[in-house]
Amino acid sequence: MKIKKILITGGLGMIGSTIASKLINLGHEITILDAEIARYGGNHFNINEIKDKITYVKGDIRNKKLIDSLVIQKDIIFNLAGQVDYNHSLIDPILDNDINCKGHLIVLDACLRLNKDAKIIFSGSRMQYGKIKHNPVTEDHPMNPLSVYGANKLAAENYYSAYFKHYGIKSVTFRITNPYGPRAQIKKPSYCILNWFIRQAMENKTIKIFGEGEQRRDYIYVDDIADAMILSSFEDKTNGNVYNLGYGKSTKFITMANLIVATIGSGNVVKTEWPKNWENVETGSIEISMKKLENHLNWRPSISLENGIINTFNFYKENKNFYW
């Protein structure tokens, strides 16, 4: 495989650092950019084992001059930087738009002007769909986001599509379901709810489930996300395409929580009332169809929820001091 020059924005986060570790092992040249915004989970420990093998730049995708300098001569750009908390998008919608829309336009524009041959990988969200009308959810499911976060993720996806159609800027966009696994921040419950529940169980605390916990989610392990994104970045047939990225099988919320408690051997699960106005952002149960990605790449996720929880628990048990 030809050695590629690769930029990963948001590279100190869970997904970005996992991709970086895998690509370094394949011999590629990696540059990581991260703004180190505290609430979004960037963690230098995530790249501790590869820090001497990569180029690290502290900076923001909204910095036009910096982005111009970084996209030059890059073959692949994993543009993963973003405001990741959909609840916070309702508190500060201007910030969400600034990072999740303007920031991505800055990267696209830099490639248009300075490096039209680069291929960009974008991480969107299941939150783009809004209320689920039918399961399994295919890529042509209606989109009506319930949050500012979902609306801005959808807008960014449309930017990538437009730049591909009008300017030939190659991109692949993913609508990721519920990611989890090692390297995620677990100081707050706003990102990777499964990881947050693992922390609660490890501290022998109570995990609170809204309602009866019958709502279903599609949980995908971070290594599966990274593998799909890497594979797509090297395949020309993915250019200009949008893909669902989940496990392809959903699990009840209550089942997931009970599985965590049983695996860790501490903590407990209780049911509580839904918060006021929660129905305004609750999408309903979701199960993702992975057929399009499977057909294009002959690939599917391999890490089961049970094994993913075990792996994640073992990671935090060993590295607790760097994430608590």
Image (cartoon, grey):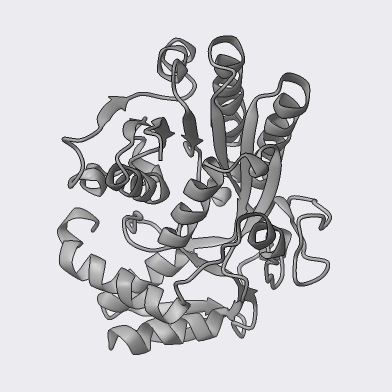
Q: Position of residue 193 (x, y in %)?
A: 46, 65
Q: Is residue 29 left or right of residue 122?
A: left
Q: Nearer the viewer, residue 21 or 96?
A: 21
Q: Is residue 266 visible?
A: no
Q: Residue furthest front?
A: 1
Seen in the picture, residue 273 relative to 56 is either above or below; the reply is below
Q: Position of residue 323 (x, y in %)?
A: 24, 56
**Which quarter of the rendering shows the N terminus?**
top left
Seen in the picture, residue 248 relative to 100 is either above or below; the reply is below
Can you tell which quarter of the image residue 30 is in? top left
**Which quarter of the rendering shows the C terminus?**
bottom left
Q: Is residue 167 visible?
A: yes
Q: Position of residue 127 (x, y in %)?
A: 66, 54
Seen in the picture, residue 227 relative to 77 is either above or below; the reply is below
Can you tell which quarter of the image residue 286 is in? bottom right
Q: Is residue 127 left or right of residue 1?
A: right
